[in-house]
Amino acid sequence: MDLLFIFLLFFMVAGLIYSGYRLYQLRSAASLAFTAGQAAVVTFLVFSYRGGVYREPFVMLTAFAVGVFVPLVFLYADLAVLRKKIKARFGLSLTRFVFRDDQIEVVSAMEKDRFIDGILRPRADSFPIDEIMGEIRVERADTSKNIQKQLEAASKKYDEGEYEAALGAYLTIEKVFNRSQSLYLNIGNVEYDRGGYEAAAGYYRRGAECAVYREFEHDDMSEKLGAINYNLGNACFHQRKYGRAIEAYKSASELYSAGGDALYNLSFCHAMDFEDTGDTEKAVEAFKALVEDMPDNLHAWFHYGKCLLKMKLPRQAIECFQKVVGEDVMFYEAWYRLAMAYDGSGMVADAVKAYYTSIQIKPDFIDSYNDLGVLLSTAGRHGEALRVLKSGLRIKPGDAELIYNIGMTLYESGKYEEALAEFKTCERFRPDDGAVLYMLALIFMNLGQPEDAMGYLEKAVQKDPAAGARAARDGVFGEYVGSEEYGRLFQLS
């Protein structure tokens, strides 16, 4: 039997089997038509072989195109879809986050290397050993040789990620030779890479202050000073010292070959400074300019959306957060803010989905549980709200906000005894909270215990004078509103 025929028939049958599998999965008319056509081509090839005409160009081309090439295209497309599904489902371990409310630093494994927390390029590279040796100017050959070896050891340890060993070697040299810009930049880079931003900034400043009069082949002194200032700006940025970062980036933009990067980081620092100091309108303008300049900076889009939320513009914020999660599906804080934007726009179903997504990505992020629980409770989905809030409480036992909202959901469900237990627990954590004391007053009234209710209402009014006016409007306290003994508590403030 002809080997070419066997080879072609084998792949055509394999393709037909795969098409049959796709037909079973998709169950569409198009899949059925193609599978039937493919089966016909296989049959046609077999009869062509028996008739001795299978080597005709038309027969071979038809058999290869329909029986082999098209199934391979389908297989490639299906593998691409499968890869996306696997990445979405199992990509959770690829991400690490550091969260501070309103002081957010998010580090994602899916983030492009171009940006680190919104600024361009993490730092300028360390200077080579020859540069340092030229600056410290050791005259004795044996001393020079020893220092060379120590610098080589420090550089090797640094490249291997052994920052403590690299730092120790560099600092040993720095104790004796403390006038080298290149040495200080390298020491600063070690501290920077191990997260010691404050220490890194100190070494960068010492490098900038060094008076070195000789120019070297590697770069001129203005380039070197610009690189140091660029790194100093990055170190200050990570400490949220935006004013100092701005000064450093200004100097770097005038001296450094990467001055364009320095200018962009300068603009980003200005925007972050506006947001940090509460000048939201200026922050919105600044972040808008940043995303127009570099649309792939996800952190600029993220902070732009945050500022729009603060300005009560949730619909505009939706676009920002959709951009972020569209590029980085694991950016859990963006999903959380997107849910807030949907909620603020009245898009409850979308908000619920976004909150659940943020929980799936970051199961220990309590704010998602809390806000989702409140949204579900407000929508009348009390059972689901309780499940969500209690799930959050299992992760963070004793969280007063979660306990309060569990109590509120139980109260709105008419389960006053259970609500009482939650609010009594909440009172232990927040004994001076007027809202907690007021809810206890409401619950005791609904349980038919007016004396306890009025005692808690009096405590609530002492902590929050507006509680009395609210009680008068609520209609739960009935005859007590106009009574001689308690009427004073319901006076409008």
Image (spheres, grey):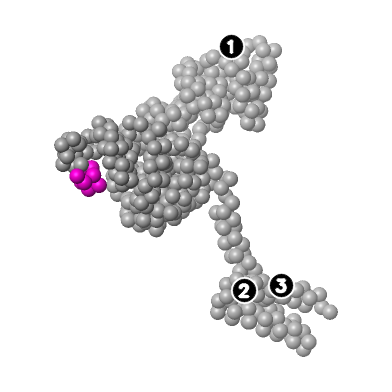
Q: Can you identify the residue that label 1 sits on?
A: 176
Does the magenta portion include 397? no
Identify the image quadrant of residue 260: top left
Q: Residue furthest bottom?
A: 51
Q: Are marks 1 and 3 in contact (CB under 8 Å)?
A: no
Residue occupying image coordinates x 52% and y 15% = 179
Q: x%, y% of residue 290? A: 37, 43
Q: Can you identify the residue that label 2 sits on?
A: 24
Q: Can you identify the residue that label 3 sits on?
A: 14
Residue occupying image coordinates x 74% and y 81% = 55
Residue occupying image coordinates x 78% and y 87% = 50
Report the Cα–Cα distance between label 1 and label 3.
Answer: 73 Å
In this image, 21 relative to 321: left or right? right
Q: x%, y% of residue 91? A: 57, 49
Closer to the eye: label 1 or 3: 3
Report the Cα–Cα distance between label 1 and label 2.
Answer: 76 Å
Q: Eyeballing the image, is 221 above or below 262?
A: above
Q: Secondary structure at mark 3?
A: helix
Which quarter of the image is occupied by the C terminus?
Answer: top left
Q: Amino acid at mark 2?
A: Tyr
Q: Secondary structure at mark 1?
A: loop
Q: Earlier in the sequence, mark 3 or mark 2?
A: 3
Q: x%, y% of residue 66? A: 64, 77
Q: Earlier in the sequence, mark 1 or mark 3?
A: 3
Does the magenta portion include 472? yes
Q: x%, y% of residue 111? A: 51, 45
In this image, 252 relative to 313: left or right? right
